[in-house]
Image (tube, helix red, strand yellow):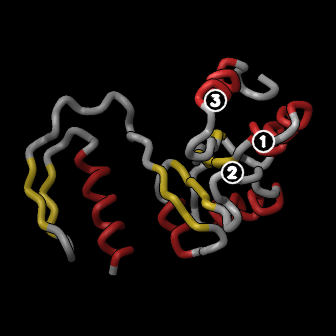
Amino acid sequence: MRGELLDESLEILQELLTGNALLHAGRHYAIDSPPLLPAPVQDPVPIWAAVRWPNRKPLARAATLQGCFPIFPDSGDRPAPPPADELMQLQAELTGLGAGRFLDVAVRCALHRLPEYERAGATAALADAGVTWLLEAFAPGQDAAAVEAYVRGGPPGG
C-alpha cells in the first residue's frame, strides 16, 4: 500500500514539475491543478529513490527515475565504501529493470576515515563501478575544524 501511494505521488510530482496543468484521478489521489509556475529549468527535475540494498522491490521504482541512492546493510555513521561487486550487481539489476543509461548512483561513505593514500584509489574504484555521486559521511559530533580541513582539501584524486 505504501509503495502504491509513493508511486502515484511520484507520478503526480513529475507531472507537476513539467509546468503543465494537471488533472489526475488515480487510485489514491485526485488532483486538479493549474500549472506550477515558473516551470523548472531542468527537464526532468532529477528525483532519486533510496533503496535498502539488497532489497529488490524498490529497484524497479529507482529504475524509472533519474537516480538511485542505495543504502547498504553496514552503513552506519561512518560507512566504508561499498564493495565494487555489489555496486556492479546493483547496476546490472537496474539496467535489467530498464534504467536509463544516465541514471545517477549516489553512494554515501566515510572516505575521510581511510588513510590518505587509499582515498584516490577508493574513489576511482567507486567511479569504475558506476557511482556518479559520492557523498562524504561525517558522523554526528564530528569536529567542525576537521570537516572543514577535509572539505578544503578537495575531492580525493581530483
Under mark 3, the amino acid is Val
CA neighbours of label 2 inside 10 A, class few (<14), some (14 to 19), many (20+): some
Q: Quadrant of residue 26?
A: bottom left
CA neighbours of label 3 inside 10 A, class few (<14), some (14 to 19), many (20+): some
- Residue that carries the numbered disc 2 in the rendered image: 78
Name the side, left or right, on which 112 lies relative to 134: right
| Whole-number angstrom distance, CA of label 3 to CA of label 2 | 13 Å
Q: Is residue 153 above or below residue 47?
A: above
Q: Position of residue 18 (x, y in %)?
A: 27, 41
Q: Quadrant of residue 158?
A: top right
Q: Is residue 136 visible?
A: yes
Q: Position of residue 121 (x, y in %)?
A: 88, 37
- From the viewer's side, name the closer residue of 87 and 154: 154
Q: Earlier in the sequence, mark 1 or mark 2?
A: 2
Q: Quadrant of residue 91?
A: bottom right
Q: Position of residue 71 (x, y in %)?
A: 61, 60
- From the viewer's side, name the closer residue of 6 and 139: 139
- Residue that carries the numbered disc 3 in the rendered image: 147
| Whole-number angstrom distance, CA of label 1 to CA of label 2 | 8 Å
- Residue that carries the numbered disc 1 in the rendered image: 113
